Amino acid sequence: MTQRLRAEDLAFWLTDSATTPMHNATLEIFEPRGAFDHDRLLALVADRLAFVPRYRQVIRTVPGRLANPVWADDEDFDLSYHVRRSALPRPGSIDQLRDLTARIMSRRLDPHRPLWETYLVEGLAGGRFAILSKSHQLLVDGVATIDLGQVILDVAPDPTPTPQVEWSPRPAPAGSTLVLEAVRDSLLDPRSALAAFGENAGLLVRGAGVVGSRLSEVARLLGGRGPVAPTPISTRLSEQRRVMTVSTALEDYRTVRRFHGGAVNDVVLATVTGAMRSWLMTRAEPVPASRSLRAMVPVSVIDSDLEPTSLGSQVAGHLLSLPIGEPDPVVRLHQVSYALKAHTETGRAVAADRLAGVAGFAPTTFHALGSRLAAAQVRRGFDVVVTNVPGPQFPLYAAGARMTESYPVPPLLPGHALSVGVTSYDGGVYFGLTGDRDALPDLDVLGQCVDEALEELVDSASSRRRAPRGRRATPVAPAAGRPRR
């Protein structure tokens, strides 16, 4: 029996377009131990592909669109098509790597093949190389499939070999079989069948070109309102992207947390807030004291009312007002901490060390789930998506090569020209900024503002330690029950 796309998956499938390709990506940089080439990466992926069987499946449409499409094994699966090789002119710089990543992120995945690609990027300075992986949002749901990036990394340079599992594709279901299954499912669940028919009928109408702009289509499909107010990051998107990466030290965030209280997550979000404020000011944008940006912040929770995942927790959306109008970095931090306090005191919040302890490199899957949730909840209205996922604080390896940096590369939602992803790993905190190429030609400036905003917070802790005699600097106690990392 085939597995049918669910209603929310169908929405992602229909939303995918040249201006809004619905894929997530992760950019990881490695230091090799010995030779590492395309054949070695091919062998590594082939060894782990049994853990993610959907990576060998394609989407089949039901004749007459009587029901949602189904997943089916790709009878012509070609691993070498999906695991690709690229290179930078030696010695390749991080700027060149970002440009290559942006070009790859701008291209849609082939809908007639399994919806993922992995690139080995050679030629980085110092003999390093990068692995860039991207997968469609409906491929990684945390239930049937986790991200491939979660299973190709190991905790030791010489991992125990994975037991080999022979794979052969199941024959593709005949059109008549798909129709019979659609009729049966319609009889068992007529409400879902009617909804599926409406969505598929809408697709046919759109294909005939009798509707308005693509943005209005997406808003109707997802029930959305788009961004809440006109800003430089709220605009119609082009088909091209920019990517900016920023590497920071986890100890800086811990220093600020120890002095001012709260959690590392609070410091990360306060850093994003300060960076957005400074960046808008470089654009001569008015930033009055009352101004804020509405952010969608996916958070991990334990909630029996949400769909269970294979990761031990679910992902829920938290709307947060980033106080970009506040000039004082310490006050901004406390405002962010207070805004998050309600969530952490519900008892559903998952501690960062628990997330970091999930088997494999779970940040890749959690970022994918956060992007899915943001796309599904765009109707709530927000300006920017910020996903922050803690990872393990020890080195991981791919076929013996040590991973030194890991940057999320989140997708853009319709009408949203900026998306922010953050991953902590092995003593570092790595920002991945995705921007529309036309709308944000100064995305690199925003990256510089991230560094400066963090430096402001670190300086605030250092300067208050050195307060003059008679003026005691008293750190604010952390809120009770706050998970810390």
Image: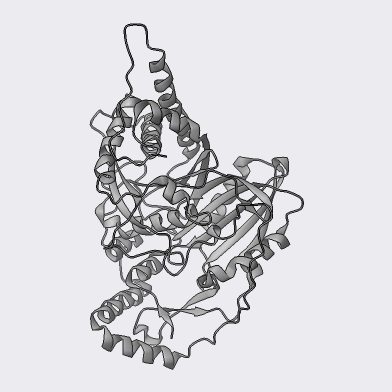
> Which percent across, then down, holds residue 273?
36, 35
| Number of disc labels | 0
In screen coordinates, is 191 left or right of 172?
A: left
Determine the image quadrant of residue 120. Answer: bottom right
Q: Is residue 420 visible?
A: no
> Which percent across, then down, holds residue 324?
31, 33
In screen coordinates, is 66 left or right of 49?
A: left
- 241 vs 324: above or below: below
Q: Residue at x 58, y 46 (%)?
A: 99
Q: Quadrant of the C terminus?
A: top left
Q: Residue lying farthest right? A: 34
Q: Is residue 260 visible?
A: yes
Q: Residue at x 25, y 54 (%)?
A: 380
- 173 vs 409: above or below: below
**Residue placed most toward the observer, 297 or 65:** 297
- 310 vs 467: above or below: below
Q: Quadrant of the N terminus?
A: bottom left
Q: Residue at x 71, y 46 (%)?
A: 89
> Which percent across, then down, holds residue 24?
48, 57
What's the coloring here? Answer: one colour
Determine the image quadrant of residue 405. Answer: top right
Determine the image quadrant of residue 161. Answer: bottom right
**Residue placed most toward the observer, 180 or 441:** 180
> Which percent across, then down, holds residue 414?
36, 55
**Residue placed most toward the observer, 363 or 179:** 363
**Residue placed most toward the observer, 420 or 231:** 420
Q: Residue at x 50, y 46 (%)?
A: 242
Q: Residue lying farthest top? A: 469
In screen coordinates, is 415 left or right of 109?
A: left
